[in-house]
Image: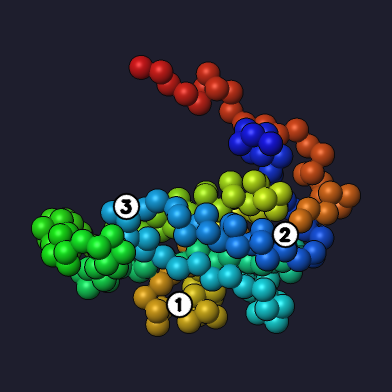
Amino acid sequence: MSLIEQLNWRYATKKMNGNSIPDEKLNAILEAIQLSPSSSGIQPYKVFVISDRDLLKKIHPIASEQSQILDCSHLLVFASWDKYERDAIAETFQYTLKERNLPSDTMDAYLDRLWGAYSPLPQDWHATHSAKQAYIALGIAMVAAAEQKVDATPMEGFDNAALDALLNLPEQGLKSAALLPLGFRDAENDWLAPMKKVRRPKEELFVTL
């Protein structure tokens, strides 16, 4: 299938059937997330891959009791940095340089410029900016899931503070940004499954200058 066909196939699945995703499909989705672009290549987030049923039961009420939390195969929790720190950015750059066999001081000037721009900004800006990077990975994950014929339902309707506490995110310098249950649609019991996919008309969405 072409990318457009895959995107037409996917939808925000409302009811999943509880079947498990084969490892090769899950790994393909996770690899796509790993390859996602981000500002300066920092990838300021972690993705928690949750399949433990007891933990999912605890998340269920936190996520407005949405059934996909219980019926999914795996739940991805995208958790972004609560703030940028020079040392954390430098560590990412050093890893990149090592992998590319470049001198360790190659990115020093860029690090200075980047930190000079980031450090004066308030922590709320840091948290928002890092969450935006996590959302890029979220989008890539949904496309990758469609390519693997795996259903994925992005979610924001959850108690961030409660989830952060449950997963001990503050201690890790993280804040939950979005949820993505992965699984397979229960088409017979999902009211949205037979519905036509509707998006804004192209003439309203695109502005050609």
Q: Are marks 2 and 1 in contact (CB under 8 Å)?
A: no
Name the residue rendered at 82%, 46% in the picture. 191
Label 2 sits on what residue type? Gly
**In the image, is 107 to the left or to the right of 206?**
left
**In the image, is 194 to the left or to the right of 172?**
right
Question: Which mark sits nearer the N-terminus, 2 or 1?
Answer: 1
Position of residue 67 measured from the top left corner of the image (x, y, whole percent)? 74, 63
- Determine which quarter of the picture holds residue 25: bottom right
Which residue does the numbered mark 1 point to in the structure image? 169
Position of residue 131 measured from the top left corner of the image (x, y, whole percent)? 41, 58
Of discs 2 and 1, which sits in the foreground? 2
Label 3 sits on what residue type? Ser
Numbered badge on residue 34: none
Label 1 sits on what residue type? Leu
- Determine which quarter of the picture holds residue 201: top right
Question: Which mark sits nearer the N-terminus, 3 or 2?
Answer: 3
**Looking at the image, which residue sits at the far right?**
188
Q: Nearer the viewer, residue 29 or 114?
A: 29
Q: Secondary structure at mark 3?
A: helix
Task: Please determine whether, in this image, residue 32 is positioned above or below residue 6.
Answer: below
Q: Are marks 3 and 2 in contact (CB under 8 Å)?
A: no
Of discs 3 and 1, which sits in the foreground? 3
Which residue does the numbered mark 3 point to in the structure image? 39
Position of residue 207 measured from the top left corner of the image (x, y, whole percent)? 43, 21
Which class describes the residues within 10 Å of circle 3: few (<14), some (14-19), or many (20+)?
Answer: few
Q: CA distance from mark 2 to mark 1?
A: 25 Å
- Determine which quarter of the picture holds residue 68: bottom right
Which residue does the numbered mark 2 point to in the structure image? 183
Q: Are marks 3 and 1 in contact (CB under 8 Å)?
A: no
Which class describes the residues within 10 Å of circle 1: few (<14), some (14-19), or many (20+)?
Answer: some
